[in-house]
Image (cartoon, helix red, strand yellow):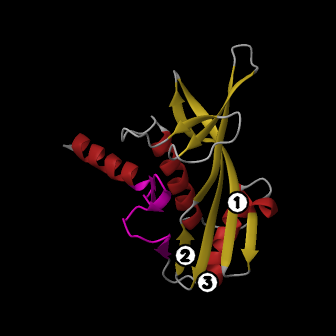
Amino acid sequence: MKKFFSIITFLFWALSIHAQYFSLTESGLKPANGENKNFIVIEKEGKTQKDLFNQVKNFITSSYVSPKDVMSINETEMITLNGISDGDVQCKKGFIMLPFRTNYTIVFMFKDGKIRINNPSINSMLAESETLGGQTGSFYQLTLSENDPVLSRREQIVVFKKNGKTTKGAKESIETFFNSLIDRVINFNSETEDW
């Protein structure tokens, strides 16, 4: 019986690690709750607009190598995050999981007790493979549908195929990356220990 409760507790903990804020569709990331909006709103009771603005700003400042290069600010009202992630988005190509360099934009807006997060925009997902000798092999671009434009000299890998299936690992890794990033942002505790 004790083992049963331990398993149940672990399952609840595992499910609560990353909330599902956005789901991936052929037209991009959309609110996971199914609402036909271009944003979600996170309630943060008891926090002022300035507190929430500072929380997101402090997260970006502490998490990115050069925050001034990835963050645009409209003081206390809005932060635009233009980031690049190396390898968090992956998909299966042949026998390997191919890591992609993902360029994205997320806009955060603030009111007392609320953070509005516009649907994240995926600007590009690019990858390179290497030969056994360590030289650059092929160039790839991960797109959501076959109708999306592809850069020259890039082989297209499509997340949502015509047959209704998805490329293995792609949809899941995109959703996991963005949902965990947003979860870390909205739950960031910028209070430091007294030293």
Task: Please state if 186 lies on the left or on the right of 105 as rendered.
Answer: left
Q: Position of residue 68 (x, y in %)?
A: 81, 63
Q: Nearer the viewer, mark 1 or mark 3?
A: 1
Residue pointed to by mark 1: 82
Distance between mark 2 and mark 3 Cα atoms: 8 Å
Residue pointed to by mark 3: 49
Q: Mark 3: which amino acid?
A: Gln
Q: Position of residue 37 (x, y in %)?
A: 45, 72
Q: Position of residue 76 (x, y in %)?
A: 69, 81
Distance between mark 1 and mark 2 Cα atoms: 18 Å
SS at mark 3? Answer: helix
Camera sees residue 113: yes
**Residue positioned 68% across, 68% down in the render:** 80
- Label whose residue precedes the other's in the sequence (2 or 3): 3
**Residue positioned 78% across, 53% down in the render:** 65
Mark number displayed over residue 115: 2
Q: Mark 2: which amino acid?
A: Ile
Asked if residue 142 lies in the magenta stretch, the reply is no
SS at mark 2? Answer: strand
Per the rendered image, the range of residues in magenta is 16-43
Camera sees residue 195: no
